[in-house]
Amino acid sequence: MRFTIRELLLVTVIVGMGVGWWIERSVTSQRVAEDAKLYDACITELRSLVEELRYPQHGVHLHPSIFDVPLKVADKAQARLKKTKQ
């Protein structure tokens, strides 16, 4: 069986594109997983800071409704993160 240079180049291009796609896909999935961990840590930190401000050890007590928006944002962000993990 004899192959022409054109056929060999075509096979090389197809294999190269497949390998390139596979490498890009694996790098992207690793980056998404790392970003999700960082995002989850940020949301957890935001929630703890809001709770710390809501119930301070000493000092001025703010009206509880001021914390509704940050907590809703944190809840929506965590729900979105859980949805993307599935």
Image: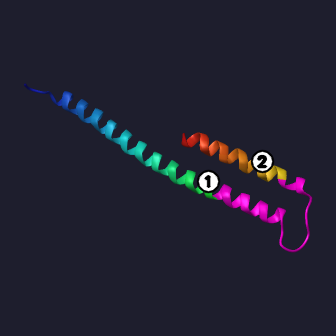
Query: Going 14% across and 27% down the picture, which residue do you hit?
Result: 4
In 3D space, how far apart are the residues under numbered discs 2 and 1 (Cα atoms)?
A: 16 Å
Q: Is residue 1 left or right of residue 51?
A: left
Foreground pick, 67 / 27: 67
For mark 1, does the 10 Å Cα neighbourhood hold few (<14), some (14 to 19), or many (20 or more) residues? some
User: Where residue 79 appears, x then y in whole percent?
Assistant: 66, 43
The amino acid type, in three-letter code, at marker 1 is Tyr
Judging by the rendered image, the residue that carries numbered circle 2 is 72
Magenta-span inclusion, residue 19 = no
User: Where residue 68 appears, x then y in whole percent?
Assistant: 83, 51
Q: Is residue 73 left or right of residue 27?
A: right
Indicate whether 61 appears above or below 24. Answer: below
Magenta-span inclusion, residue 56 = yes
Query: Going 13% across and 27% down the picture, which residue do you hit?
Result: 3
Question: Which residues, given as a range, are shown in magenta?
Answer: 42-67
Secondary structure, mark 1, is helix
The amino acid type, in three-letter code, at marker 2 is Lys
Query: Going 61% across and 45% down the picture, which residue do you hit?
Result: 81
Instruction: Pick whichever of labels 2 and 1 is earlier in the sequence.
Output: 1
Splitting the image into 4 quarters, where does residue 23 fall?
Answer: top left
Judging by the rendered image, the residue that carries numbered circle 1 is 39
